[in-house]
Image (tube, coloured by chain):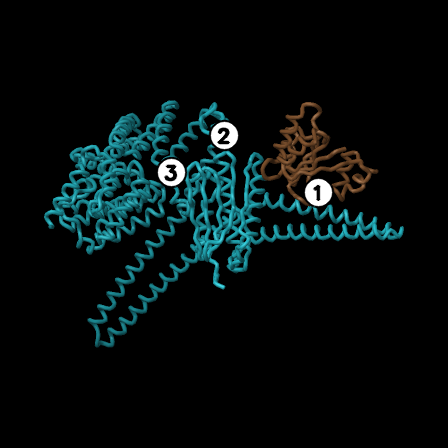
Chain colours: A cyan, B brown
């Protein structure tokens, strides 16, 4: 039976796994993945796909590494788990999400540092993920290989975030581990990273020496897609030594090699290096050509860091050739974008760095504790030594106390920053509201002022009527005055509610739950959102409908919080409609296209309904919809599709948290180009009679 | 004089009827009301262009005041009716936009009815 299973497995391998050096048919890998039910096959195929995608599409690489991780955990394969988490970290790094990348890489390092991960490893006959896996090595050496690889990723991460000292630390450690592991491909790639780090540290000799080693090994290896990276970095070193002509030949070779080997980040980097050289020698057209090419690849890669570099380079070129104010404006946008990108990331990065320090502190503390215990055993019986131990323990606990205080302080700071962030998001949405509020207040005010003035006139007339003894007339007038008074009162209250709502919206959350009429709340915020947008954008136009279920009961919620969620969803819905009208308008221009989108009628529908023991609030739009590949990201903090400066990327993530905190659910159904429906489901407490 | 008032606020009808009660009693003016841009066009059609003056809000769901203005000024080739825009936004951008689309006057909310009467030549009666 075992033999049979083995045979079946082997057939599966042959069918779907080709050897590393040959060009890979991604589709056949994916087909294999879909049809396979064997965990190990799925593990390896996911690993293969992650490898194939890692330099061409980090999003896909992330997906497959995640696949791999799930199985590694299920099969309790710790080393494969470290590999998978390492690949997650690497794809996050390429997506420009440094904080989460660091988090994952540190996790992977921790696993691979633990010798226990050698215990359960895959048998030799299982096919490889990539050129770095070598199952013929001893379990220990395999573990060191993995450790070396994840440390190398950490070095790249630190070098990308301009912390070269840390990059050097990790890179050196990675090289030492690679040497120990006797795994040549991993050593090769590590020489490149080390060389690159030396280059950034302005040590050209060490840089060239290591790059040369990488190059030599690379030529011997049957498959190294990072050859271009070596050439590029050698070129950079020459450039730093003021030898642009030599540098240029290296850059050109780097471009070709990276392109041939599908190392697209290398392509962009080479393009940018060449663009810089051409710019320096005044060949602006050539420079521009390379930046544009690089930009295309970077955008395809979905690598924000590289795109940003391309944009910056492009603006730099424009500034020389074209003093147009629009271009200046563009450079401004990009600079802001740059700042946002950096500031946001830097803060999160520090948080995680802090976590790492905490881990180290804890490890240190545990080690000290162990030592002190050891001493206690050896020296037990002697009062003298007991005194020493007491002293030691005292000192120990004091250092730990101090460390603890530091950690607590940092944690407090972190919490303060977070609440500031939330407050600023509130203020941002308040800004969006004010225009709507102005309109909403002027309307009731119009009635208050005018009806009260009319009343004065009417009372005058009433007086005259009484003087004339015309009581009928006087009574008719009195009735009119009373009716008007009611109107004044009604519109006064309306204005009052709007102002109160505004104050509540900006106020820090009181966390006070109160019985709330969900229908009223939906109605109010729909109007506010609509008029707010109308005020901001004169061309904005959309229909809105409201379908309220009158049987929806009052429920206990934090009013301004749920209000904020509803407002956020409605604003997004209108935004999606505007996006689609915009594209509909441009289609109109494309001479009688077959699409009927030209008679597109943007509509937002807000509805409420009772769903068993829950209330459902739905916000439906027929706007642009959400593409599949970002659907999963929309609830993540800082994720936004809006242009820089227009969205904080916190709206939906805060909404999600708020609904969760109310014991509810926030879901989305969407189809690209058709529209989206967000639904909030809130529990009705004690709905039984 | 026939005046068509367009606003999505229902109470605007009572307000106008009271504010102009003397003028209405003296048959110097006759008011019609529409609560959306679409309804306004409908009414205009039914009234066979009798209205000589339109007072319109700008911010309304569906067809807004600007679209109504554009429609009216484009469609009525003969002497088109006088259109005054009334809005809660007193900003210059709105003002400019109204002028550009051919509005004859521009008033902001809260409406000063004495000023409005003067503009309509109904003052002092």
Q: CA distance from mark 1 to mark 3?
A: 56 Å
Letter of the chain that mark 2 sits on in the rendering: A
Q: CA distance from mark 2 to mark 3?
A: 33 Å
Answer yes or no: are tags 2 and 3 on the same subunit. Answer: yes
List the residue tagged with mark 1: B13
The answer to whether residue A177 is visible is no
Badge 3 element: helix
| Residue B36 falls in image quadrant | top right
Residue A439 in the figure: left or right of residue A657: right
Residue A574 in the figure: left or right of residue A22: right
Q: Mark 1 touching mark 2, by CB under 8 A?
A: no
Letter of the chain that mark 1 sits on in the rendering: B
Q: Mark 1 touching mark 3, by CB under 8 A?
A: no
The answer to whether residue A617 is visible is yes
Q: Which mark is residue A19?
A: none
**In the orientation shown, which residue stands out farthest toward the front?**
B46
- For the point 65% across and 43% down, the residue is B9
Q: Position of residue A262 (x, y in %)?
A: 26, 32
List the residue tagged with mark 2: A598
Q: Position of residue A352 (x, y in %)?
A: 36, 51
Q: Position of residue A569 (x, y in %)?
A: 49, 46
Residue A567 in the figure: left or right of residue A141: right
Badge 2 element: helix
Q: Position of residue A391 (x, y in %)?
A: 30, 70
- For the point 33% across and 43% down, the residue is A92
Mark 2 or 3, nearer chain start: 3
List the residue tagged with mark 3: A304
Q: Is residue A592 above or below residue A470?
A: above
Given this view, does label 1 or label 3 mark the residue nearer the observer? 1
Between B18 and A376, the residue placed more toward the observer is B18
């Amino acid at each position: 039976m075992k033999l049979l299973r083995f045979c079946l497995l082997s057939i599966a391998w042959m069918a779907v796994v080709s050897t590393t050096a040959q060009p890979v048919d991604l589709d056949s890998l994916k087909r294999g993945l879909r049809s396979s039910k064997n965990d190990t096959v799925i593990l390896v195929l996911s690993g293969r796909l992650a490898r194939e995608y890692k330099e061409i599409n980090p999003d896909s690489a992330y997906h497959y590494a995640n696949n791999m991780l799930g199985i590694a955990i299920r099969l309790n394969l710790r080393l494969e788990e470290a590999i998978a988490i390492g690949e997650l970290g690497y794809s996050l790094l390429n997506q420009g999400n440094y904080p989460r990348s660091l988090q994952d890489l540190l996790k992977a390092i921790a696993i691979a540092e633990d010798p226990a991960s050698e215990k359960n490893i895959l048998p030799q006959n299982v096919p490889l993920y990539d050129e770095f896996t070598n199952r013929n090595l001893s379990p220990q050496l395999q573990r060191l290989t993995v450790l070396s690889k994840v440390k190398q990723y950490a070095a790249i991460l630190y070098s990308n975030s301009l912390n070269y000292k840390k990059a050097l630390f990790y890179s050196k450690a990675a090289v030492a581990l690679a040497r120990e592991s006797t795994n040549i491909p991993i050593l090769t790639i590590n020489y490149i990273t080390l060389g690159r780090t030396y280059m950034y540290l302005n040590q050209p000799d060490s840089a060239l020496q290591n790059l040369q080693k990488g190059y030599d090994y690379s030529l011997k290896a049957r498959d190294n897609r990072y050859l271009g990276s070596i050439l590029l970095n050698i070129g950079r070193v020459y450039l730093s030594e003021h030898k642009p002509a030599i540098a240029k030949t290296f850059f050109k070779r780097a471009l070709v090699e990276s392109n041939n080997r599908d190392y697209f980040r290398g392509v962009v980097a080479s393009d940018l290096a060449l663009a810089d050289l051409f710019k320096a020698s005044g060949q602006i057209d050539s420079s521009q050509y390379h930046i544009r090419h690089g930009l295309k690849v970077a955008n395809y890669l979905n690598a924000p860091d590289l795109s940003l570099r391309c944009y910056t380079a492009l603006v730099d070129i424009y500034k020389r050739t074209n003093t147009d104010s629009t271009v200046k404006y563009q450079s401004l946008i990009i600079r802001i974008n740059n700042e946002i990108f950096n500031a946001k990331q830097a803060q999160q990065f520090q948080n995680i760095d802090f976590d790492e320090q905490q881990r180290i502190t804890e490890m240190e503390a545990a080690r000290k504790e162990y030592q002190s215990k050891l001493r206690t055993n050896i020296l037990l019986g002697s009062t003298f030594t007991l005194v020493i131990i007491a002293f030691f323990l005292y000192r120990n606990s004091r250092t730990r106390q101090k460390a603890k205080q530091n950690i607590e302080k940092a944690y407090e700071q972190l919490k303060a920053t977070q609440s500031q962030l939330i407050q600023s998001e509130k203020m941002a949405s308040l800004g969006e509201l004010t225009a709507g509020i102005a309109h909403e207040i002027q309307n009731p005010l119009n009635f208050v002022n005018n009806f009260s003035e009319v009343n004065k006139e009417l009372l005058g007339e009433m007086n005259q009527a009484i003087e004339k003894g015309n009581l009928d007339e006087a009574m008719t007038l009195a009735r009119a005055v009373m009716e008007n008074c009611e109107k004044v009162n009604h519109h006064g209250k309306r204005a009052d509610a709007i102002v109160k709502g505004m104050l509540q919206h900006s106020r820090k959350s009181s966390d006070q739950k109160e019985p709330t009429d969900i229908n009223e709340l939906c109605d109010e915020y729909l109007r506010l959102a609509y008029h707010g947008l109308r005020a901001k954008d004169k061309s904005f136009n959309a229909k809105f409908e409201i379908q309220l279920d009158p049987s929806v009961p009052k429920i206990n919620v934090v009013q301004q919080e749920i209000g904020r969620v509803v407002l956020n969803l409605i604003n997004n819905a209108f935004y999606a409609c505007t996006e689609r009208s915009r594209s509909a308008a441009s289609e109109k221009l494309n001479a009688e296209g077959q699409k009927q989108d030209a008679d597109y009628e943007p509509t937002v529908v807000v509805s409420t309904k009772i769903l068993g023991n829950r209330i459902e609030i739905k916000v439906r739009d027929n706007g642009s919809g959400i593409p599949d590949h970002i659907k999963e990201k929309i609830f993540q903090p800082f994720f936004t599709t809006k242009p820089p400066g227009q969205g904080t990327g916190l709206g939906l993530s805060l909404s999600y948290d708020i609904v969760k905190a109310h014991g509810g659910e926030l879901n989305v159904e969407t189809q690209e180009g058709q529209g989206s429906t967000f639904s909030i489901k809130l529990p009705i407490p004690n709905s039984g009679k | 004089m026939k005046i068509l008032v367009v606003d999505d606020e229902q109470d605007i009808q009572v307000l106008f009827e009271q504010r102009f009660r003397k003028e209405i009693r003296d048959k110097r003016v006759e008011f019609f009301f529409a609560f959306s841009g679409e309804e306004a066009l409908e009414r205009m059609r039914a009234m066979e262009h009798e209205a000589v003056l339109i007072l319109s809000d700008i911010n309304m769901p569906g067809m807004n005041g600007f679209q109504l203005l554009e429609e009216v000024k484009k469609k009525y080739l003969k002497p088109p009716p006088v259109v005054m825009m009334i809005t809660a936004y007193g900003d210059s951008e709105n003002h400019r936009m109204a002028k550009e689309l051919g509005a004859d006057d521009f008033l902001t909310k809260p409406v000063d009815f004495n000023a409005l009467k003067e503009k309509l030549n109904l003052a002092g009666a």
